[in-house]
Image (cartoon, helix red, strand yellow):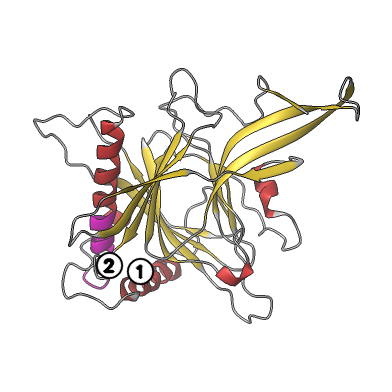
Amino acid sequence: MHRNQNQRLLPEPPPRGAAGAPPLPKREPWPRDRDPLLILGDFERYTEVEPRVERREQLPGSIFADHSVLQFDDFDGAGHDSPHGLTIHRFTVSDGGASMGPVRAPGEFDAALSRAALALRNQDPSGALRSNQGGYHSAASLRGRAEDPSHPCWGELHSILDAAAAAALEVEADEGRVPRRPTDGGEPLQVTDSWVNVNRGRGDFNKLHMHLPAVYSGVYYAQPPNDSLGRLNGAFVLPLTASSTEIEDTAGDASTGKRASEITYALMRAQRGVVLLFPASMLHAVLPSYSAECSETDENRISIGFNVSPFW
């Protein structure tokens, strides 16, 4: 088979600076018996690509136990104006690293975040309609809750997100992928907006979307989906390349006139205490989350999405 390198099957992103697409119509959760990768489009072959991984050294006492830079060399967004491939930053929060006061037991911070997220959903059950299909999406105003004495975890969370964004953008500047912050200071680097996502274990998912006009976007996982149901359950996916392939006859010396299509993608499983940062212009989706079939209650996948727009 021969790949036609000229055919682009992934949708073109909106122009930089556009306000973004209007909210999608509300839809039902994804059926359990339907292939979840169809969320990426109707292709004949779906191929997961593993990244090259570079681990950055963390100083003792750091908020993060690990900072890994994940590099994907080929994706349809890489052209003459973006020759570097796709880079994703993955941070793992240290045990107790989230605490601004007494050190918590492992898992306690994420449990507090999950309770606060569900309390927010209960206060405003309709939420916002964005890419969420069946799930809950809060207003993008969590930063305004950072001083909430009843849920101090919001302030602690934003300290984590700001630190991850600063570390990621420092690496990106070192590699020449973004401008370096001016030495005369200016506005501090902060997460510009953030929101709660709650996908219930009944097939809730998020359609392909992007976060322009932000520069970088990210997610923090407070409660992952049921990991006994396989690596696709509630996974975060980014399409990389799509192609149409000409199918030759069995002798290999003539075309059958038929074509096959293939998409490659990056997959990140939701893991508690992990922060991901990626370019806001990158299409991404969240595959459906399911509870165990024998479960009598929905098992929630809880995450906090955010955008970063450095003003320099």
In the depicted view, which residue is nearer to us: 279 or 139?
279
Q: Position of residue 304 (x, y in %)?
A: 40, 57
Give the quadrant of residue 95: bottom left
Report the disc number at residue 153. Answer: 2
Q: Is residue 31 above or below residue 281?
A: below
Assess whether mark 1 and mark 2 are in contact (beta carbons under 8 angstroms). Answer: yes
The residue under label 2 is which amino acid type? Cys
Residue indicated by mark 1: 113
Secondary structure, magenta segment, majority class: helix
Task: Report the residue at 62% width, 47% height from top.
Answer: 25
Instruction: Judge from the rendering whether residue 153 lies leftward or rightward of residue 247; answer left or right.
Output: left
Task: Report the residue at 20% width, 74% height from top.
Answer: 103
Calculate the distance from the C-alpha at mark 2 to the C-alpha at mark 1. Answer: 6 Å
Q: Position of residue 211 (x, y in %)?
A: 44, 39
Q: Where, quadrant-wise, is the C terminus in this rendering? A: top left
Q: Position of residue 41 (x, y in %)?
A: 69, 41
Whether residue 12 appears in magenta in the rendering, the answer is no
Task: Report the residue at 24% width, 38% height from top.
Answer: 170
As drawn, the residue found furthest toward the front would be: 251
As drawn, the residue found furthest toward the left would be: 184
**Disc 2 packing (10 Å; few <14; some 14–19; many ≥20):** many
Tell me which segment is drawn in magenta: 149-160
